Amino acid sequence: MMRLQKFMAQCGIASRRKSEEIIANKRVKVNGTIVTELGYKIDPLHDVVIVDGKRIKHREKNIYIIMNKPKGYVTTVSDEYSRKTVLDLVKDVKERVYPIGRLDYDTSGLLLLTNDGELAYKLIHPKFEVVKTYIATVKGKPTEEELEKFRNGLEIDRYITSDAEIEILSNTNDKSVVKIQIHEGKNRQIRKMCDKIGHPVTSLKRIAIGELELGTLKKGCWRFLRENEIEYLKRI
């Protein structure tokens, strides 16, 4: 059994104190009967609680997952072309989760999945400036002038990209491995930026979101985030 105001708070209606006010104002029914008693106890599993005409239920438990997405999967809940989605990799999770942002079909690496809409919004929206770090292999060797153009913003799809970071990690005669950091996430943005400076991407992998790193997680595998990792993301 559980006090009614505690149940309301756990369902996200209001704080316990505010829930007590709602009860006292005759806005709550339990099994069809208005309840005003503040110490009233209910069975959360069986009693029907109505607040302002709408039934309330426990919030679904928030789930936070980190995945090393392989190429060949789309970051959508479903796909009109019947391609495999990242949700096919987390079938053992009973809660309904969804990807935070996207990674292209041909891009691998760090992907977060959750049912926490507030956190998802914070990590996706550019105004919070969450840095995403990628390792890309590109054709040729970018010149310093081309790197500066990349860093200072490029016009793609009728908008100017925000400031970005890029550095060459290694190169051969026909390709370079570069580290790229951006805080936007527009469709195929890094590929389009590299195309713009004349060095198309041949492979792309995201390795970090903010300070959260992919680490040694194997391709196609996932794990639940640790408490300190969740707390870090919520502090952003």
Image (tube, grey):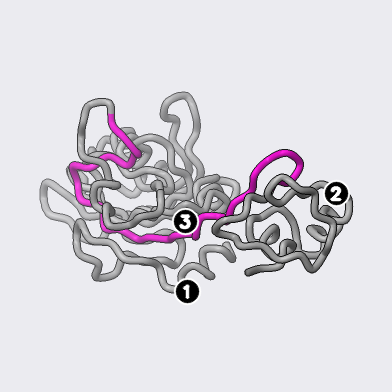
Where residue 31 sits: x, y (%)? 68, 49
Does any portion of residue 179 appear in the rendered image?
Answer: no
- Name which residue type carries label 2: Lys
Instruction: Name the image quarter holding residue 10.
Output: bottom right
Q: CA gap, disc 1 to disc 2? A: 39 Å
Vertical order, 162 against 210 (above or below)? above
Residues in magenta? Answer: 50-79
Q: Residue at 56%, 63% (x, y): give it.
A: 234
Q: Dot 3: what SS?
A: loop
Q: Which residue is mark 3?
A: 131
The amino acid marked with disc number 3 is Val
Instruction: Say whether residue 83 is magenta.
Output: no
Name the front one of labels 1 and 2: 2
Q: Label 1: which residue?
A: 227
Query: In the visual, does 134 lie left or right of 12?
Result: left
**Tag 2 residue:** 26
- The three-letter amino acid code for the residue at tag 1 is Glu
Between 145 and 44, which is closer to the camera in this rendering?
44
